[in-house]
Image: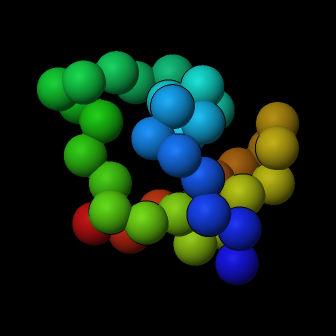
Amino acid sequence: MTLLTAQQVMDIIPNRYPIFFIDAVDELIPGEKIVCRK
């Protein structure tokens, strides 16, 4: 599993704080989808 910094995740996901509330990214296909966990 690749670990991303908070900034890298914010660069991928268009939402910003305070909406940005995820604990982990389980799957990422750039430009297609992201699966996260809370």
Between 7 and 34, the one lying in front of the other is 7
- Residue 17 in the image, given as x and y percentages of width and height: 24, 24
Q: Toward which corner of the image does residue 26 lie, by quadrant?
A: bottom right
Q: Is residue 1 above or below residue 10?
A: below
Question: In this rendering, does residue 5 appear at all?
Answer: yes
Viewer-proximal residue among 29 and 5: 5
Tell whether 10 sits left or right of 15.
right
Q: Residue furthest bottom?
A: 1
Q: Quadrant of the N terminus?
A: bottom right
* Position above or below: 10 against 1: above
The answer to whether residue 13 shows anywhere in this view is no
Residue at x 32%, y 63% (from the top left corner) = 23
| Colour convention | rainbow
Task: Relative to 20, say whether 34 is above or below.
Answer: below
- Front-most of 1 and 30? 1
Locate residue 3, reporting x and y percent.
62, 63
Residue at screen point 30% across, 36% down: 20
Where is residue 38, by image quadrant? bottom left
* Residue 12 at x, y percent in the picture: 63, 32
Q: Is residue 30 left or right of residue 24?
A: right
Q: State left or right for residue 21 relative to residue 6.
A: left
